[in-house]
Image (spheres, rainbow, N blue to C red):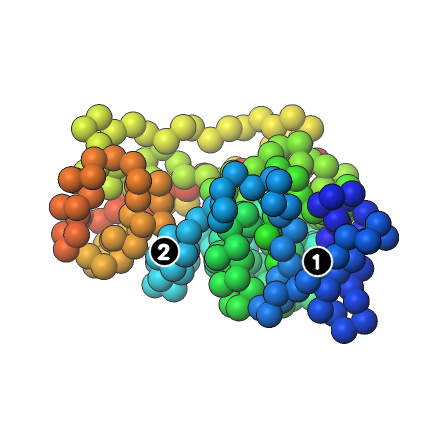
Amino acid sequence: MWTCPHCRLALLASADGAALACASGHTFDRAREGYVHLLPANRKRSAEPGDNPLMVAARRRVHDAGTYQPLADALVATLSGLPVGAGILDLGCGEGYYTDALVRAFAGSPVYAVDISRAAVRLAAKRCAAAEFAVASAYQLPLPDASLDVVVRVFAPSDDAEVVRVLKSGGCYLEIVPAPRHLWQLRATLYDNPRENAAPRSALSGMQLISQQSVQYEVTPDPGLLMDIVAMTPFAYRGHREKRKRLEGATLPALNMDFSLRLFEK
């Protein structure tokens, strides 16, 4: 399924599966964990773009604690019944938590996942060997036109035109974003004048909204998990440094977990 990031020709596996190559001669080795690196050096904005290893490790601990399990369940339920035989893409997959949920729920259907962070993709590929992972940009997806039934995006940056391009006609795009009051207690603690997240959108060029829902619940993390939640989010480098420091060892009231799910059809 992957295409060459240089010339967009199809990438074919070598006889031993250790590398992928296109007809123009561009070759990409598979990492030991099974993923392929399809982010050219001239498209990087830093030496190691995306989430760093500390953020990735914090996100893994938060996910393994079940903090986002209700959201993963809602994600799977929203896609239940949709055709997925051509494949599902987890766009901005991070360390593979939602990719793994997709593989388990849609056994037999191909699941692809991309993220710009090599640290995240390496961990994701270790977790979920059944999916196909690539280090790649969401703004130049290494996938053919009209090749997928479903694209899923959980919080990650993306490009609408690329999503529309890789979806088949009638394919669906599930966009999950934090609702306005998500993690409000943290926001109120770290900012003098906290602002709500932007309201979720209901329109997307080239697609129509076919369903929408909210997922809301509360969690009361212990101090260690609370700091992991801070570390995995933009709160890690935003807000007042002194206030972030005071959170260490603190126990906050229950945190609002509030998400918006929008399902679009091409």
Q: Residue at x 30, y 40 (%)?
A: 237
The amino acid sitting under disc 2 is Leu
Give the residue at mark 1: 28
N-term mark: 1 or 2: 1
For the residue labelled by badge 2, is the local secondary structure a helix, a strand or a loop? helix
Q: Position of residue 94 (x, y in %)?
A: 49, 53
Is there a contact, CB below 8 Å, between mark 1 and mark 2? no
Q: Is residue 74 visible?
A: no
Q: Is residue 255 above or below residue 125?
A: above
The residue carrying pointer 2 sits among few (fewer than 14), some (14 to 19) or many (20 or more) residues within 10 Å by Cα, namely few
The residue carrying pointer 1 sits among few (fewer than 14), some (14 to 19) or many (20 or more) residues within 10 Å by Cα, namely some
For the residue labelled by badge 1, is the local secondary structure a helix, a strand or a loop? strand
Quadrant where the C terminus sits is top right
Q: In this figure, what is the number of numbered marks?
A: 2
Q: Position of residue 252 (x, y in %)?
A: 17, 48
The amino acid sitting under disc 1 is Phe
Q: Position of residue 29 (x, y in %)?
A: 68, 62
Between the C-alphas of marks 1 and 2, the distance is 27 Å
Using the image as rendered, state which of residue 94 and residue 221 is in the foreground: 94
Q: Residue at x 66, y 43 (%)?
A: 141
